[in-house]
Image (cartoon, helix red, strand yellow):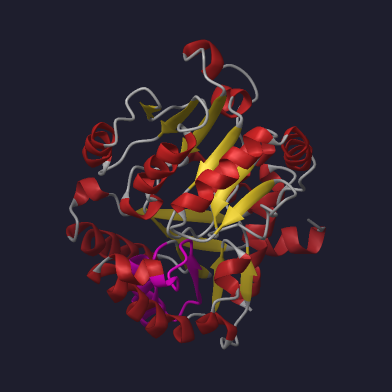
Amino acid sequence: MNRAILKKLSSMKVLMLSSDPRNSRLKRYAEVLEKLEIIGFERKDGRFARFWKGYKKAREILSRERFDLITAQEIEHSFLAWLLSNKFKIPWQMQIHTDIFSPYYVRHSVSNRARVFLAKFLIPRTNCIRVVSERIRKSNFLKEVRLPISVLPIYSKVKKEGGINLREKYPGYDLYILMVARLAHEKNINLALKTMTGVIKEIKALLVVVGEGPDRKNIELEIGNLKLENSIRLEGWQDNLSGYYSSADLLLITSNYEGYGLSAVEAISCGLPVIMTDVGVAGEIIKNGINGLIVSVGSGYILSVEILKFFKDADLRLKLKEGAKNTKLPYTSFEDYRDKLVNSWLICKK
C-alpha cells in the first residue's frame, strides 16, 4: 500500500456492524485506521433485541463522534447502516457474503425471501458494495447496479502442522473424503450421504464431516436409515483442520448455495482437490478438471460418478492434486487482504 493511501486511511474512522465482533481479525483492520469501532449483534442478546441494542449503541457513538464510514456485514445490519447513514449523513458500505440471488437461497425460507426483498431495496441506497465472489458480482440484479463493487473474498489461513490424521484414526479405507461444513440445510449434507450410498457399492470409502449445526440430529437419523454407520464419521467442531486437509484424498462440497466456500479455498491451499456443486468459488478458484470437479447443484448420482472416476483414474488424481498445489489464491497474506478491504472503504468514502 503506497504512502498516499496509508495517509488517507490513518485519518479515517470506521464504524463496523458485525455478527462476529470477537473475531480477532476484525481488530487488526484498525492497524491502518485512525479508529475502528465494532458494534456486535450476537444471538445471545436476543434474536430481535440484538438489532435494537446494536442500533442504539451505534446511534450513541455517532452522536458523540464523527465517523467517515459505516460498513455492514449482513443484510439486517445493512438496514441499520442505512438508517444511521441517513440520520448522521455518513457514507455506508453494504457487504454481501451469501449468494442471496441464488434460486436455492430464495426457496429456503420466508426469512430468506424477506432478506432478498430488503437487499433489493437497500442496494440502490448504499454508497458502495463489497461481495466475496465473482458469482455474486455477476448476478443479474447486481449487473444493473451503477455503484463501486469490490470483489473481496474472505481471508483464511490453515495451520500447516498438527491435527488429526484420518488414515491413522480410521485405518482400512480405500478413499478418505472430507467435508468441512456447518450442519445446516443450505450445506445439503443429506446429498453427501446419498452420494456415499453409490460410492460404497464399489469401493470402501469413508466420509468424515467436520462441523456442527442445527441439522445434526436429522443427519444422524439419515445415516442410520441409509445404513451408513461404517462409512460416515461426524467429527463435530475442530479448531485445527490441518491434519484433516493433509490426510484426506479430496474435499466434498454439496451445498445448495454459497457466497464463497471457504473450505474449498482452505483445501486448495493445502493441496487437496475439491469435488463440489456449482456454487460459490466453483469456476472462479475451483476449476473443473484442473484442481477439482464441478457438478450441478443437487446431482447426487453425478457426484458419485465423479468421486469413483477420481478414485479409479490415477492420472486424473495426480493432475488435480498438482493443480490444487499450483492454484493462485486471492491473497498473499493477511496484510494483503486487509489492505484491499480498507482500500474499498476509501473508495466508498469518495
Is residue 163 at all visible to an observer of this figure? Answer: no
- Specify the quadrant that holds the N terminus: bottom right
- For image coordinates 20% across by 50% down, the residue present is 45
Q: Is 198 on the left or on the right of 347, as rendered?
A: left
Q: Is residue 204 above or below residue 44?
A: above
Is residue 322 at all visible to an observer of this figure? Answer: yes
Region in magenta: 74-103
- Pick the residue in front: 53 or 215: 215
- For image coordinates 45% across by 70% down, the residue present is 102
| Place of residue 132 in the rendered image (x, y in percent of width and height, measured from the top left) | 57, 61
| Place of residue 293 in the rendered image (x, y in percent of width and height, measured from the top left) | 64, 50
Q: Is residue 83 above or below residue 333?
A: below
Query: Residue 39 is drawn in which quadrant?
Result: bottom left
- Pick the residue in front: 188 or 280: 188
- Pick the residue in front: 201 or 247: 201
| Place of residue 266 in the rendered image (x, y in percent of width and height, measured from the top left) | 60, 40
Residue extending furthest toward the front: 202
- For image coordinates 59% across by 63% down, the residue present is 133
| Place of residue 38 in the rendered image (x, y in percent of width and height, measured from the top left) | 42, 53
